[in-house]
Image (spheres, helix red, strand yellow):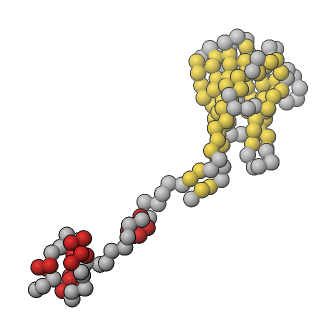
Amino acid sequence: MPTAAYQSHLFIIHDDKGRAEIPLDRELHSIGRDPDCDIRLVSQFVSRRHATLVQLSNDDGTYCYRIVDGIPAGRSSSNGLVINGLKLRAHTLEHEDEIVFGPKVTATYLLLRRDEVTAAPDKWDITLIGPNMMGYPEKENANSDNLHKGKFSETRLNQYGLNQNLVEG
């Protein structure tokens, strides 16, 4: 059973501490060196409040993220943001965007989406398939009543692997 479109936003960070994957699921994410930041970057080249991720709604009910240099009140970071090779003050993120916060401090934004999620088949499904549904011709029922009443021709008996001795009896 199909359900609504699914999307997942992921922020992959590389800094002096190593690699970290952060799922994005809130309206605001603060990014910086400050221990109170939602996404903490470990580097002396990163500002205490380097950037902010803001969740924006799309017309189709999904959402995206916009990264803004510094804090929303307007104070910019010391080094700024370099996104896909361009120094920008703000940018609406797209799948696989590369963000540079400073030397050896980067992030990659990933937007993982499935247009339609299909539910797993019901393990209790008892759908019955008949031979005619598979393209096979429908055969007469070869039960013992039909055999004893002589309802099968010799051709039909041979088709079922039976011989005439079963019918006469």
Q: Is residue 117 above or below residue 12?
A: below
| Nearer to the camera, 107 or 36 | 107
| Nearer to the camera, 138 or 112 | 138
Location of residue 166 by image quarter: bottom left
Image spot of residue 56 (x, y percent):
79, 40
Specify whether residue 128 is in view: no
Which residue is rendered at x = 80% and y = 18% of the image? 86
Location of residue 105 by image quarter: top right
Image spot of residue 156 (x, y percent):
25, 76
Circle count? 0
For this orientation, the residue located farthest to the bottom is 149
Which residue is rendered at x = 64% and y = 41% of the image? 113
Which residue is rendered at x = 76% and y = 21% of the image? 83
- Direction from residue 82 to residue 124 in the image, left or right: left
Image quarter in which the C terminus is found: bottom left
Image spot of residue 8 (x, y percent):
64, 40
| Nearer to the camera, 98 or 72 | 98
Which residue is rendered at x = 58% and y = 18% of the image? 18
Location of residue 79 by image quarter: top right
Image quarter in which the N terminus is found: bottom right
Q: Is residue 22 above or below residue 98?
A: below
Specify whether residue 151 is in view: yes
Image spot of residue 131 (x, y percent):
38, 68
Q: Is residue 155 above or below residue 97?
A: below
- Direction from residue 74 to residue 53 in the image, left or right: left
